[in-house]
């Protein structure tokens, strides 16, 4: 009888392979915030220093908030990094996939100088990236640079939602980050739709239809 299978730890294998092929610098890119009903979608791009990689990098979803904050500080202190957003208006105009790709492009483009290659979390590459790139399914659990990007993106977006929660109390954004929890859905019914809600998302769109 065997025990539970352990999840493999993220490592630097894919980055090292690209460096061996001639890429001087490799960025990991990830986004957070596709599923919420409110707030921006946020992406980060990180070029780790192979000689100074913070210990404990992992998919941000597996870490506590305190651990993410600690690692975010370590990443910023030892790496080249950038964070970018796509707004609620852009999400509604483009759709959430294209808006998340826009945030990824912005994050990569904000790295100066540009990296020679990028590892992008997911199974689709955004169009018009500023450097050659490779899509990596579950990249945030496999690649250290993508894990680092997932941490920075999550911490940055949570900070945005904390600020919006202070401006719009009652929706629970400081806890649910805009995701459709029971509290958030109830607040939508009792307090209404804010300027930070994604009108193209079904629960919000249906409420708007009912109001009309």
Image (cartoon, rainbow, N blue to C red):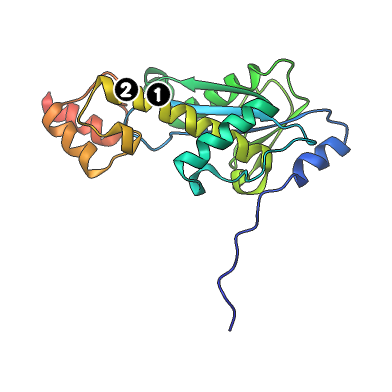
Image quarter in which the C terminus is found: top left
- Residue at 59% from the left image edge and 38% from the top image edge: 124
Expressed as whole percent of the image width and height from the top left, the position of residue 145 reads 67, 37
| 149 over 136 or under it: above or below | above
Secondary structure found at label 2? helix
- Asked if marks 2 and 1 touch (Cβ < 8 Å), the reply is yes
Is 89 on the left-hand or right-hand side of 9? Answer: left
Nearer to me, 7 or 162: 162
Q: Within 10 angstroms of label 2, few (less than 14), some, or many (20 or more) residues? A: many
Residue matched to label 2: 164
Expressed as whole percent of the image width and height from the top left, the position of residue 177 reads 35, 34
On residue 63, which mark appears? none
Q: How far apart are the two marked residues, 2 and 1, measured between alpha carbons?
A: 6 Å
Q: Within 10 angstroms of label 1, few (less than 14), some, or many (20 or more) residues? A: some
Residue 208 visible in rendering: yes
Expressed as whole percent of the image width and height from the top left, the position of residue 184 reads 23, 37
- Residue at 62% from the left image edge and 43% from the top image edge: 57
Secondary structure found at label 1? helix
Image-quadrant location for residue 45: top right
Nearer to me, 40 or 63: 63
Image-quadrant location for residue 206: top left
Residue matched to label 1: 160
Is 14 on the left-hand or right-hand side of 69? Answer: right
Image quarter in which the N terminus is found: bottom right
- Residue at 14% from the left image edge and 27% from the top image edge: 191
Expressed as whole percent of the image width and height from the top left, the position of residue 130 reads 69, 20
- Residue at 26% from the left image edge and 19% from the top image edge: 167
Is 143 on the left-hand or right-hand side of 155? Answer: right
């Amino acid at each position: 009888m065997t025990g539970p299978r352990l999840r493999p730890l993220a490592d630097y294998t894919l980055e090292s392979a690209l460096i061996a092929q001639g890429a001087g610098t490799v960025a990991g890119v990830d986004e957070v915030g596709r599923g919420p009903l409110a707030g921006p979608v946020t992406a980060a791009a990180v070029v780790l220093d192979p000689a100074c990689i913070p210990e404990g990098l992992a998919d941000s979803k597996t870490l506590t908030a305190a651990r993410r904050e600690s690692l975010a500080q370590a990443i910023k202190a030892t790496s080249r990094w950038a964070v970018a957003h796509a707004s609620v208006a852009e999400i509604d105009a483009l759709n959430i996939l294209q808006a998340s790709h826009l945030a990824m492009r912005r994050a990569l483009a904000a790295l100066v100088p540009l990296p020679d290659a990028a590892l992008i979390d997911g199974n689709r590459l955004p169009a018009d990236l500023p450097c050659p790139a490779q899509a990596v399914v579950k990249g945030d659990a496999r690649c250290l640079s993508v894990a680092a990007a997932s941490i920075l993106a999550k911490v940055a977006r949570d900070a945005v939602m904390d600020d919006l929660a202070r401006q719009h109390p009652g929706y629970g954004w400081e806890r649910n980050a805009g995701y459709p929890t029971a509290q958030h859905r109830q607040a939508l019914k009792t307090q209404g739709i804010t300027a930070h809600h994604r009108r193209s998302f079904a629960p919000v769109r249906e409420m708007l239809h009912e109001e009309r």
